[in-house]
Every structure is written in structure tokens, then in C-alpha cells.
Amino acid sequence: MEARLNVFGNPFAATFLKHINSAGMAVGKSSVPAATQELVKIRASQINGCGFCLDMHTKEAAEAGETALRLNMIAAWREATVFTEAERAALELTEQGTRIADAAGGVTDEAWADAAKHYDEDQLLALVALISVINTYNRLNVMTRQPAGDYQPGQFG
């Protein structure tokens, strides 16, 4: 696969990505566990078919100590017993927040209430921001056909 645009060599893209990266760094500094953040990024990227982000975030998660079992089970998290209740609530919020167009009304009150049982207001805002940011990255990469497979953990800092 060849990218449609050289996103990493374009001055406008560099300016745009600098701002998106800043938003991502703010979320990264939140009190939402790092492992949960990676699960969210991976699940949204699976739904959106973003190979570039899947390559990056599965490698980053593995580098941070995430197990192969949990990484392999993310797509089937509902049936998997390897995730905590808090992680499951975050994954449900991710799915519903990513598939807004598929549901009249977006995220259900039930999914929100379940997430609110496990995360405080700041953490909920961080999760919403994270879901928004990863969906932005997914759309950018899918639309421009960014190739996947060559990412090295820590490559972008």
C-alpha cells in the first residue's frame, strides 16, 4: 500500500498534527490508567479499520507490558474474562462513541452510567477526549491510506 498523501512531510499536516498530538498528550497525563487508554485506542482503531494505529498501539501496549492474550481478545472483549469491569465500561463507551452514526442518539444512558461507576468526571472527560482523538487519527490515516507494519515503539516520542 502506498499513502495517498505524505502526511509526515507536509507542513500543513505537521501544524495540524502538532495540535492533535497536544490533545493526545493531555489525555495521556490524565488519571485514566495507561493500559485502559491503549485498550481504547486499539478498539476504536479496530472498528475504524486503521492499520496504522493498530500497528502503533498494539506495539506500544506490548512494550508497556500488555499481554498477548489481552491484546488478542480486545475485539471480543464482551466474551473475554481478561478485562476488568472498568476496562469493559471504557470499551463499551469507545464502541458507542466511535459508532455514533450507527445509533440514534449516540452513547446510551446505560453505557454512560456504567462508565460513571468506574471513572470520575475528569476521567470521563479524558475518555471522551481520547475516543475523539483516536477517531480523528483513524480517519486521517484511513482516508490517506497510511501503510502499517513498520512502526517501532517510541517512534513518535
Image (cartoon, rainbow, N blue to C red):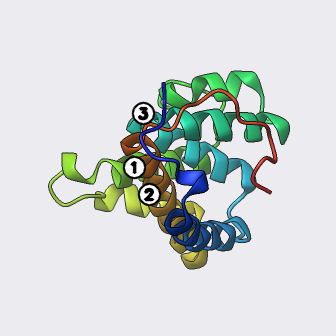
Say which residue label 3 marks. 49
Please give the name of the residue rendered at 47% of the width and 45% of the height, measured from the top-left corner. Answer: 141
Question: Pointer 3 and pointer 1: residues touching (CB < 8 Å)?
Answer: no
Report if the CB atoms under discs 3 and 2 are less than 8 Å apart: no
Mark 2 surroundings within 10 Å by alpha-carbon count, few (fewer than 14), some (14 through 19), many (20 or more): few
Q: Residue at horizontal 54%, vertical 44%?
A: 88
Q: Amino acid at mark 1?
A: Arg
Q: Is residue 113 above or below residue 155?
A: below
Contact, mark 2 vs mark 1 (Cβ under 8 Å): yes
For label 3, the SS is loop
Q: In the image, 32: left or right of 130?
A: right
Q: Which label sits on residue 136? A: 2
Residue picked out by circle 1? 139
Which residue is rendered at x = 69% and y = 69% of the image? Answer: 25
Q: Secondary structure at mark 2?
A: helix
* Kind of residue at disc 2: Thr
Outermost residue, bottom side? 122
The residue carrying pointer 3 sits among few (fewer than 14), some (14 to 19) or many (20 or more) residues within 10 Å by Cα, namely some
Give the mark nearer the N terminus: 3 vs 2: 3
Query: Left or right of 100: which side holds 138?
Result: right
